[in-house]
Amino acid sequence: PLSSLEELEQRLESAVGAEDYERAAAIRDKINSFRQDSYIAVLQANSEFYRAFRERSTSAMKAVWHDPGDDSDQKMVVCAHPGMPPIVGRDDVLESWSNILGDGAPRIHPENVKISIVGRVAWVTCEEKFAAEPGMDTSPFGCLATNIFVRSKAGWRMTHHHAGPVQGRIGLVGD
């Protein structure tokens, strides 16, 4: 089945092909609105992940992660914490977060956030800056993170998080 965006894009192509430019313009506006709404929703989902981390909330962290439901899809949920092997499967990923959040995890502040969306998949890259306690300056050390989200009936949910340590300003491509 086609996504709503793919459906709109096909309708736009059809309107242009029929030289119905008034209808094409209206569809174009719907496409732009849809993309902007998706961008904002992914940004919000990413912010909720870092808020759960900062607040050390296992319930908020659980709400962020995709629930594939079917056991055969459990492998699509993956988390690679810095310096650790990847953890596969929602239950194991959530258990790892419970351990991290319960051990006084550092406060993480995402910076230089970049978002890309293709269909039902979005990926976010960012620098993760650390502060030991609220109100403290962030350390010059941090991680480069990639967060992948899928759009489901529940909204945009994280299906993959990978963070690796770096020193100093990362300087993502496009800065």
Image (cartoon, rainbow, N blue to C red):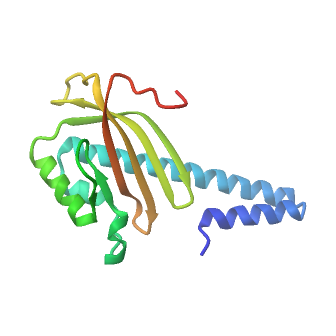
Q: Nearer the viewer, residue 36 or 13?
A: 13
Viewed as shown, does residue 43 lie left or right of 59?
Answer: right
Q: Residue at x 82, y 63 (%)?
A: 15
Q: Residue at x 54, y 51 (%)?
A: 117
Residue 109 found in image quarter:
top left
Viewed as shown, does residue 121 lie left or right of 4?
Answer: left
Q: Nearer the viewer, residue 98 or 41?
A: 98
Q: Residue at x 15, y 30 (%)?
A: 133
Q: Can you name the residue that lies furthest to the right here?
A: 19
Judge whether 128 appears above or below 55 on screen: above
Residue 88, percent from left and from top: 28, 62
| Number of numbered discs on residues | 0
Residue 7, percent from left and from top: 67, 67
Viewed as shown, does residue 112 lie left or right of 120?
Answer: left
Q: Quadrant of the N terminus?
A: bottom right
Judge whether 107 appears above or below 56 on screen: above
Residue 136 found in image quarter:
top left
Q: Nearer the viewer, residue 157 or 171?
A: 171
Residue 86, percent from left and from top: 28, 54
Q: Can you name the residue that lies furthest to the left here?
A: 103
Residue 37 appears in view: no
Residue 174, percent from left and from top: 55, 30
Q: Residue at x 32, y 70 (%)?
A: 74
Residue 141 found in image quarter:
top left
Judge whether 115 appears above or below 15 on screen: above
